[in-house]
Amino acid sequence: MRLKLTLRTIDRNPVIPINYQYPVASAIYKIIKDAEPEFSKLLHEKGYPSEHNRRFKFFTFSKLFFRNPAKVKNNTLVLNSNESIYFLISSFNEEDFIKNFIIGLFESQEFSIGLKNVCHTNFKVVYVEALPEPRLQETLKCKAISPICVSLKDDQLQPTYLRAMDPRIPEAIKNNLIWKYRTLFDKKEFQCNFNFKIDEEYVNRSGGESKVSKLITIKENQPDETKVRGFIAPFTISGDNALLEIAYRCGIGEKNSMGFGMFEVENSN
């Protein structure tokens, strides 16, 4: 299920970090914790362990959409008073994640985005809408609405983040989705068809891979701060419905629970 969450600023001088992905994720965990502390602890601290020692959370969220363009100042986004913004959030786990998220929202009716010693703004939850699901046909033309993150480990087991047109991306995305499927359904063996193709014409028209690349700081100004690189560009995916559904609900690529890999389907009725 996918939700559209509309918020309105309630602080006098609203400002949020330009790297808002981690603060938004933290706010999501807090909302769920208010509704169901034990599920929140499981999700945040453990997740769902996979056969490759990755821990999937099986949710993702989009970038923030602003009614009026935000002003960039000192690595922050300055908003207007009484500003309305929205974002989308999606999960494969409707019974636990979506249900508890909605309960937590209606209990608090607030959503706070911020970082210690950087900036912080409180928002009022003004609208929560369940979005209709697209028809996940065999071939989907998609538009990324948050950065897509794909990486491979180097000799020191450090991630090398791949650029938009790297030929290794389709196989890495397919393997990631298969791992998610095996974890969700406790299947040791599962193989299927899946293809990913970036819109190369869009990337070239935008000025190349560097122009669609996004460098995001996670846990900004904290000892364990990290930088994650992704890209935003249209793409096409095709294959078995099982993987298309996981990709749509959980996100494509890595670090979905930090606001990476969400997309809209453009060619569905």
Image (tube, rainbow, N blue to C red):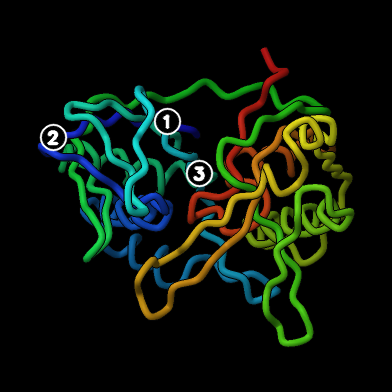
Give the spatial CA distance, label 2 vs label 1: 17 Å
* Mark 3 neighbour class, 10 Å CA radius: few under 14, some 14 to 19, many 20 or more: many
Q: Quadrant of residue 104?
A: top left
Do the numbered discs 3 and 1 sit on residues whose CB atoms are within 8 Å?
Answer: no
Residue 178, compared with residue 211, is above or below; it is: below
Viewer can see residue 28? no
The residue lying at 48 percent from left, 33 percent from top is 2
Amino acid residing under circle 2: Ile
User: Disc number at residue 91?
Assistant: 3
State left or right for residue 102 relative to residue 186. left
Query: Quarter holding the C terminus?
Result: top right
Counting from the top left corner in percent of width and height, residue 127 is at 28, 24
State left or right for residue 192 relative to residue 106. right
Amino acid residing under circle 3: Ser
* Mark 1 neighbour class, 10 Å CA radius: few under 14, some 14 to 19, many 20 or more: some
State left or right for residue 210 relative to residue 97. right
Counting from the top left corner in percent of width and height, residue 27 is at 30, 52
Which of these two is toward me, 22 or 37? 22
Q: Secondary structure at mark 3?
A: strand
Give the spatial CA distance, label 2 vs label 3: 28 Å
State left or right for residue 227 relative to residue 3. right
Would you name the residue on which mark 2 appears? 10
Do the numbered discs 2 and 1 sit on residues whose CB atoms are within 8 Å?
Answer: no
Which of these two is toward me, 208 or 269? 208
Q: Quadrant of residue 194?
A: top right
User: Disc number at residue 220?
Assistant: none
Which of these two is toward me, 196 or 184? 196
